[in-house]
Amino acid sequence: MKTYTITLLFFLCFLYTKSQEMGFEEYNPKSTLVVPENLVDKAKFTFIDVHSHQFRMATQDLSTLVRDMDKMNMGVMVNLSGGSGEGLQDMLKNVNNNYPNRFVIFANVDFSGVGKPNWGEEAAKQLESDVKSGAKGLKIYKSLGLRHKDINGKRIAIDDSRLDPIWTKCGELGIPVLIHAADPKSFWDPMDKDNERWLELKTRPRRKRSATNPAPWQQIIDEQHRMFKKHPKTKFINAHMGWYANNLAMLGELMDEIPNMSVGIGAIIAELGRQPRMAKKFFLKYQDRILFGKDSWKPEEFPTYFRVLETDDEYFPYYKKYHAFWAMYGLDLPDEVLRKVYYKNALNLIPGVDKSLFEQ
């Protein structure tokens, strides 16, 4: 009995000691650096968020959204998750009955029938009907290129010619296509000590892909760029800066090659905030083709975007340690560039937005 008691006490002491040890995932030191801080809870200019997702907009109380939008000076939210047909019409009805000038809804395409006779023409016809109902653009999810397969079980490439009627129709209708292709390249890279997304992949293992799952990263990205070039009369908004925010020189080359491509900054502010000089040069050069977007709807995260874009603050934290373990620096963009990023560029691309909400 005595031996058992001693063993039990030893084991309990061991558990207590282990519980007091900090895991590397918890390591998140507070900076001791003393520098000026300029917290920005409200954007300097009224802005359009071109990248938001509200899946329950047909039934939700929009007044709650509007209150949060007003607090941060958001004039218009673009809901990219409009769907199609009756579901889209229900969303539009709720918006038009309550806040018709505060929300814009993009339609989506159902790719499940690719390969059937005349599928592309029928999809384009449905899109045209959705635009007549009130949709102001088309959103393409990353599932195109990653998960969607045709009726024969083959992966649908983004530049598949069977999809051409959709992109052509968007050009004819004068609506933009906001498209998300692939994910950060690090998700395809080896998960080793050199992968700066290691912690994210460790804590969220479902995001990890093999080098060829379902195709090499570069192949998917190249498919997207070929499609852009094939349809020069259609305006494309490349979500997440096309995953080249960590290589702005390359992104600049692509911007020069593809004049009908603009980029959104949703979910990549951490990349811009760690290279303030390079990023500022990029924003100055391509100021007419960069749009504000956030992606996930978390109002408490918007101030980091405002602070990176508007201030010259140094070494301040990002809001997701697993996503970016480095600190942020402000770009201190000129007012005219801020106006373009916040709303002017979106007004030039998205038809039917109430311009009276913004400075002219």
Image: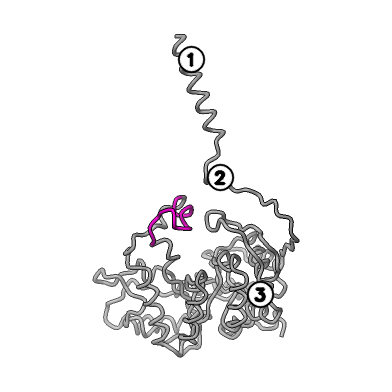
Position of residue 294 measured from the top left corner of the image (x, y, whole percent): 58, 67
Task: Tell me if label 3 and label 1 are in contact, CB under 8 Å.
Answer: no
Q: Magenta stretch?
A: 189-202
Residue 47's disc number: 3
Task: Tell me if label 2 and label 1 are in contact, CB under 8 Å.
Answer: no
Distance, label 2 to label 3, CA atoms, is 35 Å
Task: Categorize mark 2 by other alpha carbons within 10 Å: few (<14), some (14-19), many (20+).
Answer: few
Q: Quadrant of the N terminus?
A: top left
What kind of residue is marked 3? Phe
Above or below residue 8? Residue 207 is below
Task: Tell me if label 2 and label 3 are in contact, CB under 8 Å.
Answer: no
Position of residue 232 measured from the top left corner of the image (x, y, whole percent): 44, 89
Distance, label 3 to label 1, CA atoms, is 66 Å
Q: Hey, which quadrant is residue 35 in on the image?
A: bottom right
Mark 3 vs 1, N-terminal side: 1
Q: Is residue 192 magenta?
A: yes
What kind of residue is marked 1? Ile
Residue 6's disc number: 1
Mark 3: secondary structure: strand
What kind of residue is marked 2? Glu
Tally of marks: 3
Q: Hey, which quadrant is residue 16 in on the image?
A: top right
Residue 26's disc number: 2
Distance, label 2 to label 1, CA atoms, is 32 Å
Q: Is residue 130 visible?
A: yes
Query: Residue drawn at (55%, 63%), measured in percent from left and top?
Result: 296
Query: Residue drawn at (66%, 49%), measured in percent from left and top?
Result: 30
* Residue nearest the observer in this picture, 276 or 184: 276
Position of residue 358 measured from the top left corner of the image (x, y, whole percent): 70, 80
Position of residue 337 measured from the top left corner of the image (x, y, whole percent): 66, 80
Q: Main secondary structure of the magenta part?
A: loop
